[in-house]
Image: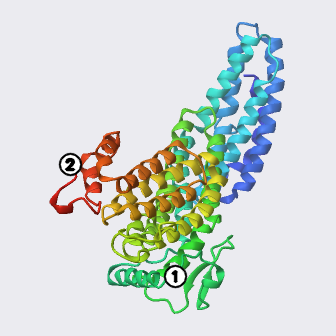
Amino acid sequence: MIIHGRHAQFLRADDSAADLPATSHPSDDLLQDLDSLTAKVRAIVKSQFAVIHRVFPGAVAPSVREVLIERVCHDPAFGLLSHLERLLGGNGMSDKEYVATLSVAYEKCCGLVQSIGSFPLDTPAESDRMRTFLTVQLQVLFGGHRQRYVQIEQDLLGQGFDKTLSMIKWPPIPSGKNKYKLKEQAAKETAKGHQITSPTSGNIPSNTTSLTSPASTTALASPRDAAPANKPEPLNLFYQMLLPISMDDTMPRKFGRDLQESTARCDVVLRNSELRVELMARLYTSYCHAFGDEYLGKMANLSHELVQEPLLCLESASNFFVVNGLDKGDFVGNKQVQTQSKACTQVVQYLSHMFMHACAALDDVGGVSNRTQFVSNVCATFKDTYIAHLQKFKFDADGACLLLTDLAMYRQAFRVCHHPSIDDHFDLLHAIANIYALPRDSLVSYVTEGLQTTLGKATLHALIRRRWDYNLNGDKIPI
């Protein structure tokens, strides 16, 4: 037809070298050939559209233009499809090279389609029809490659995440007898009055070497005379190895960069395709699994091993109270009612350090809402731990005064943010302390004002039984 003239011969003469096997031409050369081909196709289509407009009547011209587009796309000798197969069909091409080449080729063809779609036609309806037809032809050209691309992109992202995870040298978890001895040793050190301190560079032993990952300046401390990998590390060394890993912000950036590169390619290759939404969901699912479960989850699990140790976790607060902080077993006859207990001093010191660092980190990533949620959750845990602690001792009025003094210190420590639930928790603890401060005759009317509903009958009775006069002369308090 029209294309069988001078332009067809020009294309065949220029592209005859491209008929050689794909392995004879690097992909860069083929991409350059694609640039030349798309430029020639654009010039041919533009000139032929003008000829079609002059030669064919208006009712026939749209169909003739579509035949022309089909020919330049699918002609076995010089069409775009045959060139794309040579470009993307090489067996020696790696997945990464394939995806990169596919992205570039698709962008070039999209540019060609947009250019042809902008050519002026007789009516807006004809222009819309041509743009729709061009979109269909683009899908035909890349349909098979898009299906293949979806799986390859997932594989590449997974490989990138695996490579990042393999760069992290996690410390072995203290376990078994070694862990038991560490807890015992930590309790003894606490009993001697050791304070909770934040680790500094001065605390880290000199017999460590630094392992650095590529593109990272964070040193991962590792013992020079390292034991086998399956041997548990001492607690202090375990902590010193885990801390720099948790502070290394290059790892989260690596995960984010890998995801960003994948989604950017997805936006190009799957533009205007239903596969784009499906692949995006899979990519983000892979990111959540690798970064959330494998990285943050691992970090949380290892950190959990640390926060189980004495003086390192709020949930060990009962151990602070029972073993390390008190001079005597019960809060009976305590003469220092105006000062807080040793346990309170230690816990408040720990809370201050924890809130200072945790809240600063949370404010950076999520603002005040993250800080409030974290402190509120810690306060709820503290309340439950404190109530369990109260059930281990007996209290008289002097002991109740000490409790109220401690609670004032604890409430102050939690004032790093303001939230109604925090006030509610401490109001409840204050009310419980009054159980031991009130005279025996006033107790019945006091506890009927909502404490039983809040605490439950069993817990309330367990707390009341800790009054020093509960079984005085065999007469239980009638509650």
From this viewpoint, is residue 5 visible? no
Q: Residues within 10 Å of mark 1 (few under 14, many from 20)?
A: few
Counting from the top left corner in percent of width and height, residue 138 is at 64, 32
Counting from the top left corner in percent of width and height, residue 262 is at 61, 50
| Mark count | 2
Q: Secondary structure at mark 2?
A: loop
Camera-side residue of 245 and 281: 245
Query: What is the number of the mark on residue 194?
Result: 1
Q: Residue at x 67, y 15 (%)?
A: 63
In the figure, is residue 140 to the left or right of 227? right
Gap in angstroms between the C-alphas marked 2 and 1 = 44 Å
Q: Residue at x 52, y 75 (%)?
A: 169
| Mark whose residue sits in front, 2 or 1 | 2
Residue 55 lies in quadrant: top right
Query: What is the number of the mark on residue 478?
Result: 2
Question: Pointer 2 and pointer 1: residues touching (CB < 8 Å)?
Answer: no
Q: Amino acid at mark 2?
A: Pro
Camera-side residue of 257 and 339: 339
Counting from the top left corner in percent of width and height, residue 227 is at 45, 89
Q: Residue at x 71, y 35 (%)?
A: 110
Whether residue 312 is situated above or below residue 18 in the rendered picture: below
From this viewpoint, is residue 341 visible? yes
In the figure, is residue 179 to the left or right of 241? left
Q: Residues within 10 Å of mark 2 (few under 14, many from 20)?
A: few
